[in-house]
Image (cartoon, helix red, strand yellow):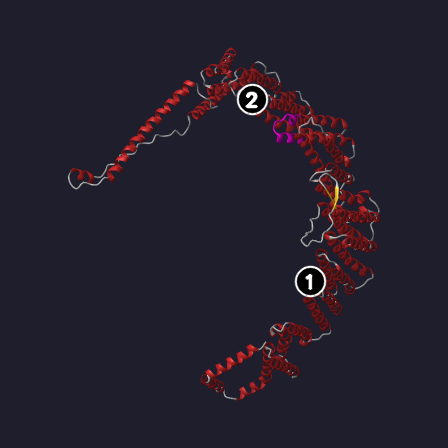
Amino acid sequence: MTNIPPPAEELRILDHELRQLDARRAQLLARRAWLLGVLRSAEAPAPAWGPARASAQTPAIWAAPAPHPRRPEATAPGVQNVLLVLGGVLLTVAAIAFTLVSWGHLGIAGRAAVLGAVTFAALAAPVPLLKRGLRSTAESVAGLGLVLTVLDAYALHEVALPEVDGTGYAAAATALLAVLWAAYGRSLGSLRLPLPAAMATAQLPLLLWVVAVDAGHHTITAALLVTAAFDTVVALSVPVRSVRVVATVGAYGTGAWGVLAAGWLSWEATGPSAATRAAALLALAAAIALGAAWRAPATQAASGLALTGGLITVAAAGGVLRSVLPDAWTVPGHLLCGVALLAVRGSWLPESVHRGLRWSSAGVQALAVAWALPLVTVVLVGPVGWAERVWSGAPSDARDAVTVSTPWPSNTETAPLVLAAVAAVLVLTFRGGPHRSVALSGALGLAWAAVLVLPATLELPYLASLLTLGVTTAATLTAAAYSHHAHPTDDGSTSPAEPPTSSPTQTNTRPSPITLTALGLALLTSLHLVVLSLAAEAATLAVLGSLTALFAAVAVRQKHEIRAVSAAASLAYATALACATGASLDWQPHHIALLVLLVPATAALLAARLKDSTPTLSVEITGAVAALLAIALAAMEPPVLALVLALCGVIAAGTAVRPDRRQVGYAAAALFVLATWVRLASWEVGSPEAYTLPVTVPALVVGFVRRRRDPGTSSWTAYGPGLSVTLLPSLLAAWGDLDWPRPLLLGTAALLVTLVGARQRLQALLVLGGGTLALVALHELAPYIAQAMGAVPRWVPPALAGLLLLALGATYEQRLRDARRVRDVLGRMH
């Protein structure tokens, strides 16, 4: 309600402000002059005598700072608006109280005179106020006048027309008030309140009228939509901003209620007639939204309105189709209407409207795909229940095969058609451009999902469903291979991949989305096929054998990522085939383990022939996993487990022959040792030397060979681990052994090791052999020492210890010299 004052009033305000600025400037100049005088007096030299010196010693008296003027906390226009609004509210409350409470104390003439006079005065007062430039006051009085007109209408009904229906009278009164307020606002163009108030009141007449005549739901919905259309026209055509804001809010509000009501009527329609009437209402709403999008000035708002209009159009047409089609065809009918939106073309429509229609079509297609996803999930997850009933018998048809653990969703017979239709739309829509590859990947996934659920939907025989899935696996693998060699370009054509070069700096290109999608779908389909085949023994063996051959053939003919994945999948299915074959022959698990070992052996041979690092690694990893499975299968039979470990060691040793896999030799050695230990344990051998010597002998041989090749290798590195593995466990066993053969043999071995270390001047052999020999000797002398200690008096050991300490102290220097000589000798040993 803030306005610009008249020129005379504004000139008076400016003069007042200028006078305040002049006064403040004079005050600041006086203060500045005084400060300069104080600074000059402080810098002047003090006189030696006289009154000047006395005055210089007198302390200066500082003047009090000038008071700052208080700034008002509220602006004059703000105070004015508060007063005017408060006054208008109070007058309105008083008028309402007078009309509702004091009305009955006056006669008809008095009532008419009071209301007429007050209303006329309130509506006429803004005219002179505007002429005087008091626009805010005029706005407040005009608002009071508008409220009084409402009270006049109420009073007229209560006194003169009490028998008239209240709702119908309210409809006529609101329509008349909206027209009068609009005319009043147009006549007084400077007022801002009457026009938006008239627009807000115009939302009620039509709705009140249909309620007054007891109209049905369709008529009430039509009234809401007609009101929304009127608001839309006003919002797009009237230049007054406040009116446009009120009209926009009304259009969105009444339009949203109208669309919801029409949608509910369409959903509840039980026949074509009711569905057609609801569709007509939805069509009206769509026309309003599309018309607003066509004329909307903002691009984003136009796209959103076009999106809404497209969705409402689909709901209208789909509702009619739903009333005449079976329930299973409801989603395909709506999908057909959504796809039809893509056919709306032409330069006569703005690009924002085209974009909104495309978005609405995409939204309908996404909802249709989401409706079909539960069926795809049931088909994928349902056959997992066969894992608990392996080879229990083939089901009657494909639907029974996938619903072994989950129920079949109702009214989903048209799901394959929906998925295939959306896939076709993606292919036809994105025939070129940068998003073609992603769109084709999505289309491939949707087509795969349609084929996946088709056998169960049509209730095909069990064998036919297996054949369909097998063909799908082969087709997706072929698609992955083809897309790897021919990539779609921006114009929709395909160009062959460039031939590989022999440059060492060349790097592999990243696979296209189509390749990754097709490869992933092939693997997923093959897994689904395997799980589905668990119902019958013959089906399991046939499926596993076919998948092994299929992926092996693709691995032979393709390269790069496809070869790596296909080779690993082929070996994995070969492992499963070995297990299934053994189970079919009623073999025990440890016997099946021997058959499974063919897979890691084959993987090792293939890895040696492959030249690409990626397929080689995938093949080796798959072979290692198969070897672990074989070990797990033979774990309950120790003799067979030892054989399996030994064969795994042979495979690992063969792999370690390759220059780039030398590190696998450690795994081979560990496997050989484990095989030996398991075999000894199966023979119930308890002697530790039987377990340690198979490790010591190869370790010493390896250390000897290493020192022959590298004479600088330390004896601790070459022989220390091998000797420690045998000497330490044997020494611990000898200390707890009461018989004489073990200490004798251990002492003899330690003596030989010590002699060899002394001859070859090897520190590790000398220290380990000598230490072991000394401990064995101490062990053999321990009983005699204990017997001797029991025969001598108790004071003898302390006395001997004292004599020893004295002797050591007396010859300390000679002992140190001898110790240094021994250290030097040992240091010169290798």
Q: Are marks 2 and 1 in contact (CB under 8 Å)?
A: no
- Mark 2, secondary structure of its residue: loop
Q: Residues within 10 Å of mark 1 (few under 14, many from 20)?
A: few
- Mark 1, secondary structure of its residue: helix
**340, 514: nearer the viewer:** 514
* Amino acid type of the residue that numbered disc 1 sits on in the rendered structure: Asp
Query: Is residue 103 visible to the viewer in this orientation of the structure?
Result: yes
**Residue 617: image location, x then y, percent:** 70, 58
Asked where in the image residue 37 lies, by quadrant, the reply is: top left
Mark nearer the viewer, 2 or 1 = 1
Horizontal side of 646 relative to 181 (left or right) equals: right
As for residue 294 lying within the magenta part, the answer is: yes
Query: Is residue 373 visible to the viewer in this orientation of the structure?
Result: no
Give the answer, above or below, for where 56 lies relative to 134: below
* Amino acid type of the residue that numbered disc 2 sits on in the rendered structure: Val
Asked where in the image residue 167 lies, by quadrant, the reply is: top right
**Residue 566: image location, x then y, percent:** 75, 53
Magenta stretch in the rendered image: 291-307
**Residue 714: image location, x then y, percent:** 60, 73
Which residue is identified by label 1?
Answer: 660
Horizontal side of 89 relative to 614 (left or right) equals: left
As measured in the structure, the alpha-carbon distance from the residue carrying label 2 to the one carrying label 1 is: 82 Å
Which residue is identified by label 2?
Answer: 240
Main SS, magenta region, reads helix
**449, 295: nearer the viewer:** 295
